[in-house]
Amino acid sequence: MNLIIIFGPHAVGKMTVGQHLSELTGIPLFHNHESIELALRLLPNDGKSWGGLSNDIRDVVFKHVSKAHQKGLIFTFMWALEK
């Protein structure tokens, strides 16, 4: 499976690039906010509760996609390199 990771600081266009790449390649996009938004709907935004759930959701998605024998997955990730 091909795993394409698009990373960078907040609000630089990672999702937009991922959407276009998905259209060009046929590889599905798993935008990082999909796991974050689900976790925040279920747990308080107190700076600690939802982060673990978001990471667990991502782990489960990666595991299932890798077993599905599909072409790959595009994933976006916010990473502020200066920190």
Image (spheres, rainbow, N blue to C red):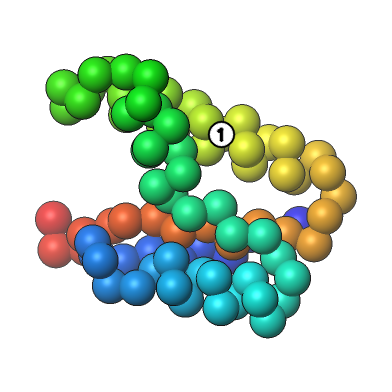
Image quarter of residue 36: top left
Q: Quadrant of the N terminus?
A: bottom right
32 in relation to 10, above or below: above
**Residue occupying image coordinates x 68% and y 36%:** 63
Considering depth in this image, is 59 or 26 the residue closer to the camera? 26
- Residue in view at x 83 percent, y 44 percent: 68
Q: Nearer the viewer, residue 29 or 73?
A: 29
Q: Is residue 54 left or right of residue 68?
A: left
Which residue is tagged 1? 59
Q: Position of residue 25 (x, y in %)?
A: 71, 76
Asked whether the viewer can see residue 51, the reply is yes
Q: On the image, which quarter does residue 71 sit in?
A: bottom right
Badge 1 marks a residue whose secondary structure is: helix
Residue at position x 46%, y 44% in the image: 34
Task: Give, as a three-letter code, the residue at label 1.
Answer: Asp
- From the viewer's perspective, tell me whether residue 67 is left or right of residue 72: right
